[in-house]
Image (cartoon, grey):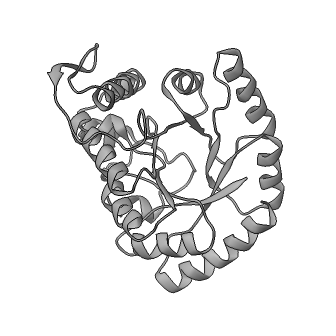
Amino acid sequence: MDFGIATFVTDNGIRPDVLARASEERGFTTLSIAEHSHIPASRQSPYPGGGDLPSVYYRTLDPFVALTAAAAATTTLRVGTGIALLIQRDLFHTANEVASLDLLSGGRFEFGVGVGWNREEMRNHGTDPTTRGALLNEQLAALKEIWAKDEAEFHGEHVDFDPVFAWPKPVQKPHPPIFVGGESEAALNRLATYGDGWLPRPGTSADELVRVRKWLADHGRTGVPFSVWGAPADPAQLSAYADGGVEQVNLLLPTKGESETLSKLDELAKVAEAHR
């Protein structure tokens, strides 16, 4: 298995360029970061992890800005979103940001997407939580048109536009790999239809990983890479990922200052080396 880093990049933690350079130096293959545009003060949506919402959710940097800094500081490290909340984003700005980052990084971007969980955050962006899955599906289909064609158009129920010009185009062809997050039936159908890779959550069992692999093959999708986001540095869990055929494990890195982060990276690098 390859090992990367999954983390929240914030305004009071290590800088993304410093983190990326240190991750590359320690042999990690990928840096994947989370996105939240803001956190509504109402806090009606329960935190999926249970308990109070961790402070990092309130302070995340824009992922495309942060990952551009990360890419500029490295030469081989792949940079990605885990996950980008596409349903809260303008389609054309996102198409441009993805293509621009892929261009500036020399084709090292991985586009992780999902429907998200904070319904108040979605509503603040004008997104109806009840149709967010259908919206994401159409957005992904429309993005592929924008990236592939000089003159693209799309006509769906949630995304609808007449022919447009949009450059730059991504360096990776036909586009950066799209990693779909989520384990629900809808998420897996989205993966089979629009995805190039799967981002299962860290608690996904080896049996489930094997089942999804077979399910994808039955639907004509073989060789789809699995990339666990936010994995614990637990030997038993890492062995389960190996048994489940996971290709990439992104170890969860707590968001801390530079000195503490570098020490933690050293620890995680030893864990990764023991399980490669």
Q: Position of residue 267 (x, y in %)?
A: 69, 76
Q: Quadrant of residue 144?
A: top left
Q: Quadrant of residue 122?
A: top left
Q: Which residue is located at x 34 percent, y 41 percent?
A: 170
* Residue nearer the viewer, 89 or 150: 150
* Residue nearer the viewer, 99 or 229: 99
Q: In this picture, is 180 found above or below 18?
A: above
In this figure, what is the number of numbered marks? 0
Q: Is residue 43 visible?
A: yes
State left or right for residue 203 relative to residue 65: right
Q: Which residue is located at x 81 percent, y 60 percent?
A: 235
* Residue nearer the viewer, 259 or 42: 259
Q: In this picture, is 166 found above or below 258?
A: above
Q: Is residue 14 visible?
A: no
State left or right for residue 211 relative to residue 31: right
Q: In this picture, is 274 found above or below 203?
A: below
Q: Position of residue 73 (x, y in %)?
A: 40, 71
Q: In this picture, is 191 found above or below 230?
A: above
Q: Position of residue 126 (x, y in %)?
A: 23, 33
Q: Which residue is located at x 77 percent, y 60 percent?
A: 276
State left or right for residue 123 relative to residue 105: left
